[in-house]
Each structure stands twice: as C-alpha cells, then as structure tokens.
Image (spheres, coloured by chain):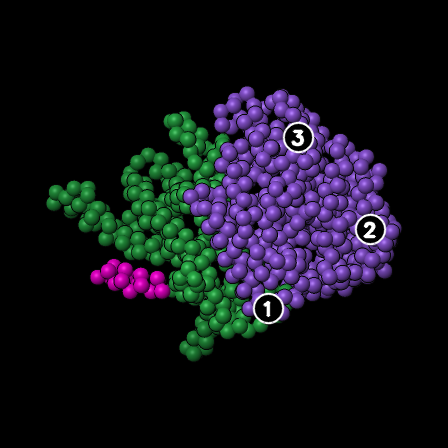
Chain colours: A green, B purple
Amino acid sequence: MRIVGQRKETIAAVCFLLPNLIGFLLFTLWPVMAAFLLSFTHWDLLTPPHWVGLSNFVDLLGFSSTPEGWQANDPAFWKYLWNTVFLLIGLPLSMAGALGLALILNKKIRFTYAYRLVFFLPGILSGVAIFYLWRWIYNPDYGLLNTALAMIGVEGPAWLTDIFWAKPALILMGLWLGVGGTGMLLYLAALQAISTELYEAAEIDGAGAWAQFRVITWPGVMPVTFFIFVMGIIGGLQGGFEMAYIMTQGGPYGATTTVGYYIYTMAYENFQMGYAAAVAWVLFVVILGITLLNWRFGGKNITS
Amino acid sequence: MRFFSLLALTLCLIGCKRPDHGQTEIQYSFWGSTKQMEVEKRVIDAFEKANPDIRVRMLPVGMRYTEKIQAMMIGNVAPDVIMVELTVYDEWASRGVLTDVTELAGTLWEEDPLMPSAEKIFERNGRYFAIPVNAHGLVLYMNLDALKQAGVSIPADGWSWAEILALGPKLSRRNGNPDAPTDFLMLMPHPSILFFACGGKMFDDPAHPTTVTVDSQESRDAFQMMRDFYQSGYVVPSDVSNAEGTYQLFRDGRIAFYLSGRWATPELAGQTDFDWDVIKIPSGPNGAVTVLGGTALAVWSGSRHSGAAKRFIEFYASEEGVRIVTQGGRYVPVSRGAAFGEEFLSLRPPDSMRRFSETMETGAGQIFLYAPGQAQVTRIFEGRVSQALNLPQVSTKDVVTGLDRDLKRWLDRRDRRTPNSKEENP
C-alpha cells in the first residue's frame, strides 16, 4: 500500500518536472553542447561546418610576434572584454543606490506603497522602450539632459557618439535601471526580515543611526548583497547586447561593444558561427571562474 | 466570443491566401517602406494577370533583412524569389544558395544592354546569380531656396567636395551665423565616397583580393578629408541623424545638401516647402566617384518552383515590370535604353532626372570588394573611420596603418579558413 503511494508520488513528481526538464534539455543543454562542438569548427551557416580544431581559440586568445612586438590575434576581443568589465563599474553604484532607496522606503512615511511602485517601474518596463527613451534623453540637440544642462549654462556633450562619454552614459542609464529595480525590492524584503527588536535594543544601549546600520542592518542584508553582486556580475558579463544594438550599434569606435554584442556580430553579421561559439565559451569560462571565486571568498565571509 | 471571431477571421485570411487548383504559389521577399510595398503589389498584380497559373505571395521584411532571410535558408524555408542586397550577394552566390541565372540575363539584355555600373555590380566572371532590377549611384540633392537665401551660387556638376564644404559658413547656423538658412550644411558624406574620391584602394584586385594596398598617401588624404568635414561642425552629428532620420532633415529644411540615391525622391516629392534639384556627386582628387548600390532578384537554390520564380523575375525585369517600378519613383532602370528613355527621364521631380542615369553610365562608382567578405571589410573600414573621427590625436598615418593591419589579418584569416578562397569568388 505504502509502495503504491510512493510510486504515485514519484510519477506525479516526474510529471511535474518533465515539462521543465524537456525544455531545459532541448533549449538549454543541447544548444550549449552544440555551441561547444561548433567552437571547434568553421561554420558560415550556409555550408556544412568543417573541423578546425583549436584554431578558433588560438585566433581568439593567442598572441603573435610582429615587427611592432607581440600583438593579440584578435585585439577587438580584448577591447570588448575590457568594455564589458568597465561597464560593471555601475554594479556597486547601483547596489548602493538600491540599498539607500530601500532604507528610505522601509521607513514609515506617507504613500510608501506608491513610492515603491514608482521606483520599481524601470524594473518592469520593456528594455527596448527604455533604450529608445534614453536615446532621446541623450540626444545632443534637443535631449532632456543637454537641455537641462544648457539651462545652467553647460554645453552637454554628444553623449552616445563621443568616445569619452559613451561608456559613462551607458553606466548612468544602468544606474537608473538598477537603483529602483529588483535590487531595491530584494533589499526591501531583507530589511523587513530584520527584527525590529534588535533596533530597539540598540537604541536603548545608545547606538546611533550609523552604528545601527553597521552592526544590525548591514549584516542583515549581507546575503542579499552577495546574491545581487553575484547575479549582477553574471548578468553584466553576459549583457550589453540590447543597449549596443539599439542605442549605439557598438560605437563610437567600438567603445560600447560588449562581448555579448561581439558574439552576435560575429555570428550573424560576419557569418562566423564557429568563432562566435568559441567567444561564447570563453565568456562562459570567465563567468564560471569569477562566480567560483565569489563563492569561495565572498560566500565564506557571509557564513562566518 | 472574441476568440471565435478572431479564429474565424484567421481561417478566412488563410483561406483567402490559398492558391486555386492548378496554381503554383511562390513566395517573394523584399525590403522597403510601405510605399515600396505598394509598388511591389502593382508588379505582382500585373504579373498574376499575365500568368494566371502562378500566385505570388509577398513577404515584406522590415529591419535586418539579410539575417532573417539567411535564417530561413538555414531552416530550408526561404522564399522562392529573394531580393538581394549587394553586401551579401557574393557571400550567398559563392555558397550556392542562389541559382545561376546567366541564361535568363542573356535573353533580358540582348537588345537593350545593361548599364556599365549595373554590370559591374552583379556580373561575376561572366555569370549572374541574380537579375539586377535597379542600380544606383548617389547624387547631391540641393535645397535651392536655401542657396538663394544665403546668396551663394548654385553648385553645378564638377564641383569639388572642398567647394561644397566651403559653403558651410554661409549655409549653416552652426558656428555663429544665426542668419544662415539651414541648421547644418549636410550629413557626413559616406566615408567610402571620400575614400574613393581621394584615390584610396583597399586591395590589389577587388574581385580577387590577394594583397592589401591601403597603406598609401591617397588613403591618408581621404581620412584627413573625413576629419575636415567632421571637425568643421557643419555636418550633422550621427546621433541627431539617427534620431531624426536622414531624408527628414532635408525635407524639413534643416540641411542644405543631401547625398542620396533615387530612392529618396518619393519621400521628398510634394513634401517640401522649397524647391530642390540634384547634381552629380562632387569630386575629389581622384574625380567624382560614388559608391555603387543596386537591387537584384534571385531564385533561392532550394526553391521547389524555380521555373515559376524565374518567370516572375523575367516579368519584373521586362519592359512592363520596369515601367511599373520606375514609376514608383525609387528605381533607376538598369538597361541603357530604359535609363535614358523618354519615359524615365520625363518623370518629375527632380528637373535633372538625367543625373541618375548619367551616374550609372559613367561606371565611376566603386565598392570595396566584388567578392565574399564585403560586409566584414566594410565594418573594418568603418571601425577605423570611427577612430579617425573620434580620436583626433591619432594621426591619419596611424589610422591607415591600423586599417592595413586589420585588412591583412582579415585576408590571412579568410585564406586559412577557406583554403580555396582565392577561387571562391563565383
């Protein structure tokens, strides 16, 4: 009787798991493995792929001796990897902003729910619409930002086409997206999970606001901070495609091309699917390495 | 209720599209605006009337045309007739996805030969893999009222790029002339045009490239000329043109000159509150050179109805088809007789219709490569242009050296990846 019941439970579990498992196998695991095999081939999409061994990886990561010294076989890749890492500067800034905002919205003030909704809006808006909106904000001729700057006598730059300003412009936009989005919501949940008794006890002991934050709040939100940081790094290293595709097309002079956008251009514009797969796998290894390091050191600190 | 209404409508539409018994249905993909779609519809209607056994289903594709069609090719569901972009023509032809239509080309232009430029663009070693239906160089659209208002003489054929740029202070409100008639002089001229106008050359043989020949004084002069335009402040910044459109800036009287092809005419006809006309493209030290462009129709090699597809293309390129598409206002006929025929030249605007035909007849147009890899080479070039324009501290010598290195790397990689690439050109 018990065995029949267990079997029923197992069948039910399999039935519930199967749709997701099939989806994972078909649309995640299979493409990932196919990409791994493709990275050892040259495939132009229209003719059958042919095996080239490690050639794609040598072209991508190797260096060659030239009359001017050692040079990367693919300098563009290193440049775009640097761009991707540079754009991650926005991550700690947006995390700090999200925590600050969550602290404010956690106070008992009027219209708290309305504020929460307003600040969370960027998190639920369509990315494409946001990027078009920001393209308008950054328009050097009549954009909101330069118009505002002109009112205080400052001539704003051509934000998206100036090689110096293009990356900071994207970071600024990322801040707008990151401060009020999911990060704020997670921090808010973490803050609400901290017992108010702790704050009351600290107050009785004469602890000021900063001391309360340092000793109670910060340790309380540490796991969420770690989670947002790890996910932010993973997302940041993978990301940048939509921004580049819609706002800058990777320019000026490749200043906003990220590795994600590079993979797309190699695959669908240059017809080098094998090479694009190699870039994707290198990116995967980089992300995996950084995430393991994070878990090894960051995760250890949190548990201790 | 709404669901059933929608279902009924969908079924009805599917039913409407189903070809009659005995009819062959072919699919035809193209890009372009809604106005272009109307023109295509007119050609299809005329074709179906003349060929009742064939039904043509339109597949208009908006952005990223090439990528979408290529994805369909990989999925083995590509359209029977494909409008082909010049940038991928060699790529597709060399990989065997376009049917050889040399025989059809031979019959089409037996009596009325192709214009030299159209032939240059699409003929490869005596063979055709698509039938050109439109070929174009660029001309300079001029806002005549703005020129009169600024009190400058109207530019004529043979003017140089330097002479055009020198009009900036009088025509553009930028750089301290609030009384000038327009905001900017023009959009940034296509860098490749200035490159060719200065005599720059990428490869020893654009059809069978084996050596990079870009490291020259002509190339350095070309990059300097690009910088002169960019740094003058009279050309439209790219984010302004990206946001506001290109022909829209000319239509709205915000730029005095607009470098474009015949396709811009329908967007301007009757839409401006000023008079405009066109002249031939200005010249550089190497003469007046335009980039070449064109539209061709190809039969997908996987088509199950290649006979019907060829018949459609034959009709499209016939006298009747050409008449319909040229009246649409975007195309320049590819054969000499039609391009210089009364029917085409009498179309208005502009008054100087002949310029479109003459631009194609001179054969002075160029593209970087008449072989696979055109899109990649163009992107490499554009990357260095971006460097030259955005980093003024980098000398033009270094920019050209960098371009030379990039192109050599591309050529080397191409040769390694496809050992027979030197013979790859169809």
Residue A73 in view, yes or no: yes
Q: Magenta span covers which residues? A: A289-304
Which sits in the foreground, B204 or B70? Answer: B204
Residues tagged 3 and 2 counted as in contact (Cβ below 8 A): no
Q: Write down the quadrant of residue A4 in the picture.
A: bottom left
Give the vertical position of A301 relative to B140 (above or below). below
- Given the image, on which type of amino acid does mark 3 rest? Pro
Q: On screen, B212 above or below B38?
A: below
Q: Residue at x 83, y 45 (%)?
A: B337
Residue at x-position 19% and y-position 50%:
A215
Q: Is residue A303 magenta?
A: yes
Kind of residue at badge 2 = Pro
Q: Chain of mark 3?
A: B
* Residue denoted by label 3: B155
Please name the residue shown 70% across and 49% down the image: B294
Q: Give above or below for B339 relative to A299.
A: above
Q: Nearer the viewer, residue A55 or A241?
A: A55
Q: Distance from label 3 to label 2 (Cα)? A: 32 Å
Q: CA distance from mark 1 to mark 2?
A: 36 Å
Q: Chain of mark 2?
A: B
Q: Position of residue B403 (x, y in %)?
A: 51, 53
Q: Which residue is mark 1?
A: B418
Residue type, mark 1 in image:
Thr
- Find residue B113 and name its label: 2
- Frontmost of labels 3 and 1 is 3
Task: State how far apart marks 3 and 1 are (Cα).
Answer: 48 Å
